[in-house]
Structure formats: C-alpha cells, structure tokens
Image (spheres, helix red, strand yellow):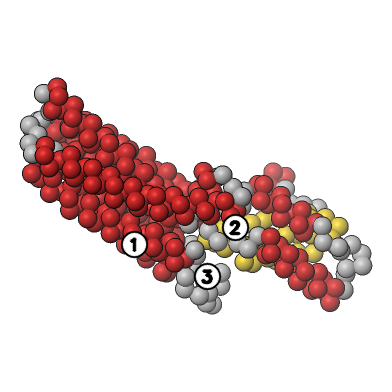
C-alpha cells in the first residue's frame, strides 16, 4: 500500500505540474480569469503533492524513545498543511481575481487555445483521479466497507489527491461554462463569476480535508461498529468474563492503538495464565484486524468507566 500511495501522489504531482503550465499559458493568452483561477488551483495542487510526499516519507520513520508509537501522525499534519495550501493559494487567488474580473470585465481572446487546454487538462486530471479512486475502492473492498465510509479514514495523501482531482474536474467544467457563457452572451462578467465559483469549490474541499485531518490529530477512535466487533473477539476468548471498557486511537490509517479493560474468570488470575491469555487475544485480534498494531489488556474486576458519570 505504501508504494501504491507514493505512485498515486507522484502521478498527481506530474499531472498537476503539466496542467498548471498549460492553463497559465492559455490564461495569459486569452485573458480568461477562470483559466488563471484554474492555473492557480493546479499550482496549489502541485505544491501540495510535495507536502503529501513528505507526509508519506516521514511517517515511515521507525519508532524511537521520543516517539514510541512511531511517526504515523505526521501524515495528518502534512495533509492539513496541504488543505491550508488549497485554501490560501487556490481559493484566495480564484476569488480575488474573480471579483476583479466581475467589477472590471475584459473580453476573452484566443478561444482556439482555451478549449483544447481545458480538454487536455480534463483528461490528465481524470487519469490521476482514476488512479486515486481505484486505490480507495480496492482498499474499501478489502476492509468490507462502503467507499465513502472508508474514505473518511483512508490514507490522507491518497484522500487529498482524490478530493483535489475531483475538485479539479469540476473546476474545469465550471471554467468551460464561464468562458462559453461569456462568449455566447457577450457579457464577460461570466468569466469572473466562474472564477469565484471555483474559489468557493476549493474552500469547500479545503474545509473538508482540514476538518478530517484536525480530528485525526486530536485523536480519533475507531468506528463504533469496529470497536464492537473487537469487543466481541476479545469476549469470546476462553478466560474472559467480559470486556468492561475499550479505548482505541488511530496513530495512522493502518496503525491503531487499542486498550481493553477485561474481567477475567477466577481461573485466570496467575501471572503466567494472564500472559498466555493476553498473547492469544493479541494474535486473534491482529489476525482479524491487522491495523491494530498495539493491544493492551487491563485485567480488572472494576466497573466500566463511563465518562458521562464523571462529574
């Protein structure tokens, strides 16, 4: 999965760089604000791929004494910076230029350049989007989850590429519509309106990515259904009377920390028996849920700690 994610990000970066140059050239030749907004969007996406590659590389550093659970959280940090880049570079420029073009519209020229560039951009963005979508779909199928459900907790680099490329495809259609309306109606403000619409689209994408990465950085648990199934796996082990409490924390998309407070049967009270039981549970949980990299059992007969009861 790691190599596949690298390939997805590298493909997206190469496509965005080529598209940014093409859009910028077409925007300068035609004077289309929507094309320039799309060029800014592609430049922001290209820079973001550098953030995402940094996230993938740094998150693979082995655990050490300062970071005993590894560097998996770096993926969310750098992906959060990518979301900020989309907001500042992409959305900020698009809306500012769009407002200028609406207030002081200029005629569009070089239509013979605009449409071929938009068509080629759509093809290249589509190839990058298809690569990211295929990876997300395959991972969702492997986990037995709907694509949208898996996407919320997917590899942040691939998730960011999927969102960026989806926004890029929609943005290209918006730019084409703005240019076409400006030409057909003779009202050049439609070009600026399309630029503003692209900016608003990028704000929505940046907000969604920023919100999800913030939630992961703060510390997000596994989905409730997954926690329930892990509880059932632990409870079925001979020697476990019941699971009193279970806490989980995502350290990375494929790395989860689980702490379970369990009630043991009376026969499982010796140190050797508890150790053997813990090893058995650890193996079974990891077999069914490979993303659980750290599993800690807390043998206790105390009642479950309900946060709502703590006053």
Residue at the (42%, 53%) spot, across then down: 132
User: Residue tagged by mark 3?
Assistant: 70
**Where is residue 204 drawn, in percent x and y?**
37, 39
Graded by Cα atoms within 10 Å as few (under 14), some (14 to 19) or many (20 or more), the crowding at tag 2 reads: some
Q: Secondary structure at mark 2?
A: strand
**Where is residue 239 drawn, in percent x and y?**
86, 63
User: Residue tagged by mark 1?
Assistant: 10
Q: Nearer the viewer, residue 253 or 78?
A: 253
Separation (CA) of disc 2 from disc 1: 29 Å
Q: Are marks 1 and 3 in contact (CB under 8 Å)?
A: no
Quadrant location of residue 52?
A: bottom left
Q: Which mark is residue 220?
A: none
Decide if residue 99 is in sight here. Answer: no
Quadrant location of residue 251?
A: bottom right
Residue at the (53%, 58%) spot, across then down: 253
Query: Where, quadrant-wise, is the C terminus in this rendering?
Result: top right
Separation (CA) of disc 2 from disc 3: 13 Å
**Where is residue 205 drawn, in percent x and y?**
37, 43
Q: Secondary structure at mark 3?
A: loop
Residue at the (67%, 56%) spot, across then down: 247
Residue at the (52%, 61%) spot, across then down: 252
């Amino acid at each position: 999965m790691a190599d596949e994610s690298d390939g997805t990000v590298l493909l997206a970066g190469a496509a965005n760089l080529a598209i940014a140059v093409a859009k910028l050239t077409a925007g300068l030749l035609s004077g289309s604000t929507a094309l320039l907004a799309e060029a800014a969007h592609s430049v922001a996406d290209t820079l973001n791929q550098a953030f995402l590659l940094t996230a993938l590389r740094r998150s693979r550093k082995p655990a050490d004494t300062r970071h005993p659970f590894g560097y998996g959280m770096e993926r969310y940090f750098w992906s959060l910076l990518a979301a900020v880049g989309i907001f500042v570079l992409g959305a900020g420029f698009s809306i500012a230029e769009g407002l200028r073009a609406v207030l002081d519209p200029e005629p569009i020229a070089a239509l013979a350049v605009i449409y071929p560039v938009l068509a080629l951009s759509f093809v290249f963005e589509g190839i990058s989007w298809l690569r990211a979508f295929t990876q997300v779909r395959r991972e969702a199928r492997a986990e037995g989850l709907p694509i949208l459900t898996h996407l919320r907790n997917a590899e942040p680099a691939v998730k960011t590429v999927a969102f960026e490329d989806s926004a890029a495809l929609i943005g290209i259609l918006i730019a084409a519509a703005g240019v076409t309306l400006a030409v057909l109606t003779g009202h050049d403000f439609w070009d600026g309106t399309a630029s503003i619409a692209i900016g608003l689209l990028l704000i929505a994408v940046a907000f969604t990515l920023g919100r999800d990465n913030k939630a992961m950085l703060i510390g997000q648990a596994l989905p409730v259904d997954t926690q329930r199934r892990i509880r059932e796996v632990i409870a079925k082990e001979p020697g476990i009377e019941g699971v009193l409490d279970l806490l989980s924390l995502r350290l990375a998309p494929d790395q989860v920390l689980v702490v379970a407070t369990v009630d043991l049967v009376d026969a499982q009270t010796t140190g050797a028996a508890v150790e053997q039981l813990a090893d058995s549970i650890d193996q079974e949980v990891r077999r069914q849920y490979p993303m659980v990299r750290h599993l800690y059992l807390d043998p206790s007969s105390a009642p479950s700690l309900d946060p709502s009861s703590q006053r």
